[in-house]
Image: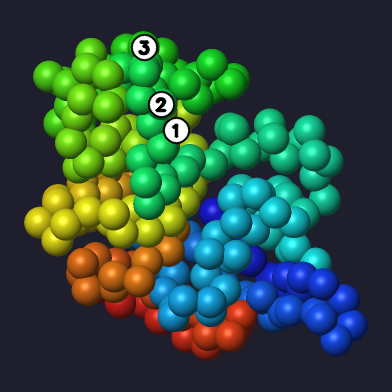
Amino acid sequence: MLEVSGLTKVYGEGENAVHALSGVDFVVEKGEIVLIVGSSGSGKSTLLNMIGLLDRPTEGKILLDGTDTTVLSDGGISSFRNKKLGFIFQFSNLITDLTILENVMLPLQIGGGGSEESARDLLEAVGLTDQMHKRANKVSGGQAQRAAIARGLINRPSIVLADEPTGNLDSVTSEKIVELIKSMARKLGQTFVIVTHDRQHFGDVDRIITIKDGRAVEAMEVAA
């Protein structure tokens, strides 16, 4: 599903060069939940930005569904990202003057293959049937993040990338969001790659990749 090979990202030149990533290698299989962990400044968010095609690497390759994304044009990247990738952020990033249903349907307007019925089905799956017609600024933080998960899944992406999806939530709500992610992974066979500083909340996952000083110092399988 995802193969990262020799991934390097350097900002600046000469004495001012900063190596955010230095030769990172790992593989993610279809249907896995993979955590990327590391201290602040370790390079984990930079890595997620590379995988999400939000920034280009200095060197190395990112293969997604067999496509070398590092050679795509800017236009090709946008199209590929919309079709193959879903995103969940630390803050739900919902548009406040749209309803929950309208927010979930937004990716469909950028060329996705879903429908209003599929959006309704996803909102039912994440427990928001009774909230879908409320404006986004009228629901709780946990409900907004559930909507963000539905939005990330609406185009049936190959991989959902999540950047600190529980970082803005209290511990009880965080546990509920983690269980929801795991449930959707099982139901849909969905692949998740998740950057988090909150390893303990996620319990058993398929793989943990530890980033330190821009390198993958550990990649271990943890699920039975």
Per the image, label 1 sits on a secondary structure element best described as loop
Three-letter code, disc 3: Glu
Point out the tag, 3 or 2, that comes first from the N-terminus.
2
Answer whether labels 1 and 2 touch (C-beta < 8 Å): no
Q: How many numbered discs sit on the rendered protein?
A: 3
Q: Which residue is mark 1?
A: 156
2 or 19: which is nearer to us? 19
Question: Which residue lies most toward the right here?
Answer: 14
Q: Residues within 10 Å of mark 1 (few under 14, many from 20)?
A: some
Q: Is residue 56 above or below residue 46?
A: above
Residue 184 visible: yes
Q: Earlier in the sequence, mark 3 or mark 1?
A: 3
Report the Cα–Cα distance between label 1 and label 2: 21 Å
Q: Residue at x 38, y 52 (%)?
A: 90
Q: Nearer the viewer, residue 193 or 32?
A: 193
Q: Residues within 10 Å of mark 3 (few under 14, many from 20)?
A: some
Residue 175 occupies quadrant: bottom left
Give residue 103's position: percent from left, percent from top: 38, 23
Which residue sits at x=54%, y=22%? 112
Q: Nearer the viewer, mark 3 or mark 1?
A: 3
The image shows residue 161 at horizontal and vertical percentages of 47, 51
Establish if 156 lies above or below 25. above
Q: Which residue is mark 2?
A: 95
Q: Position of residue 219 (x, y in %)?
A: 46, 80
Which amino acid is tagged 1?
Answer: Arg
x, y percentage for residue 96? 36, 25
Read off the residue under disc 3.
Answer: 116
Specify the amino acid type for callout 2. Answer: Ile
Residue at (44%, 70%) from the top-left corner?
A: 36
31 with respect to 132 (left or right): right
